[in-house]
């Protein structure tokens, strides 16, 4: 356990979550500042709607408070956070129709680019990739976003999905193959 007098900015995410679990709910503000943008970007790519992405981020932080007692001492905060995010997304898909949200042209999160022409080319590629990603089903899209975000290893994703790391690799490979086909179809102007 961390020193109760340590500033929140110096504490690790796990330490902060342990303190939230133990009743220091004001520490959730620091976790929110550290992770809300990353969650928003994850949800924006997943649901393709700014409003829904914002709502889902809020839902995740409500769930952190609600389920804070389930956070085990010594466990990692990131995988636990993304487990809550996956559950919030799954609940959203159960409530909403299984189709791309009303903003299929929602921009990808901004990236710093060194040259304006490079930015134009990159935006075109991102738009094409976003359109291809939107063609995938929600489960495939979620899997690719979890696997390619760099936040979770295949072992952790497997734990979230209840499958082995090998099964995750196979699913990611299949989803990438489907994404490549959709990317090519978008580039060729096929519907």
Image (tube, grey):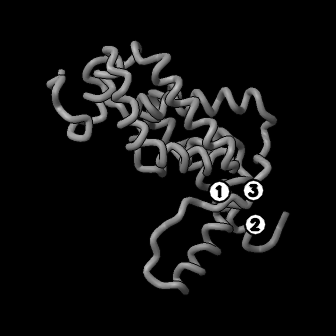
Q: Secondary structure at mark 1?
A: helix
What residue is rendered at 67% in x and 55% in y? 133
Question: Which residue, given by chain and number where applicable, does mark 2 sit on?
Answer: 185
In this rendering, position of residue 80 left or right of residue 100: left
Q: Badge 3: few (under 14), some or many (20 or more) residues near its Cα, within 10 Å?
A: some
Q: Position of residue 1 (x, y in %)?
A: 18, 21
Q: Position of residue 185 (x, y in %)?
A: 75, 66
In this rendering, position of residue 45 left or right of residue 154: right
Question: Which residue, given by chain and number where applicable, does mark 1 sit on?
Answer: 179
What residue is rendered at 35% in x and 17% in y? 21
Q: Position of residue 35 (x, y in %)?
A: 42, 42
**On-image quarter of the C terminus:** bottom right
Q: CA distance from mark 3 to mark 1?
A: 16 Å
Compared to residue 33, the image places residue 70 above or below, namely: above
Compared to residue 87, the image places residue 131 above or below, namely: below
Name the N-terminal-most of marks 3 and 1. 3
Name the N-terminal-most of marks 2 and 1. 1
Mark in front: 3 vs 1: 3
Question: Which residue, given by chain and number where applicable, does mark 3 sit on?
Answer: 104
């Amino acid at each position: 356990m961390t020193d109760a007098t340590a500033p929140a900015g110096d504490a690790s995410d796990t330490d902060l979550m342990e303190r939230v679990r133990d009743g220091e709910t004001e520490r959730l503000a620091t976790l929110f500042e550290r992770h809300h943008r990353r969650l928003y970007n994850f949800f924006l790519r997943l649901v393709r709607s700014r409003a829904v992405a914002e709502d889902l981020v809020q839902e995740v932080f409500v769930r952190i408070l609600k389920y804070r007692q389930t956070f085990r001492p010594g466990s990692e905060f990131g995988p636990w956070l993304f487990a809550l995010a996956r559950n919030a997304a799954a609940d959203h898909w159960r409530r909403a129709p299984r189709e791309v949200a009303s903003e299929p042209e929602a921009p990808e999160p901004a990236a710093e680019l060194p040259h304006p022409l490079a930015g134009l080319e990159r935006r075109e590629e991102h738009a094409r990739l976003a359109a291809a990603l939107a063609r995938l089903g929600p489960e495939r899209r979620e899997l690719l976003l979890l696997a390619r975000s760099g936040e979770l290893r295949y072992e952790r994703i497997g734990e979230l999905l209840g499958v082995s790391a090998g099964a995750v690799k196979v699913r990611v490979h299949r989803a990438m193959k489907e994404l490549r086909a959709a990317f090519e179809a978008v580039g060729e102007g096929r519907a």
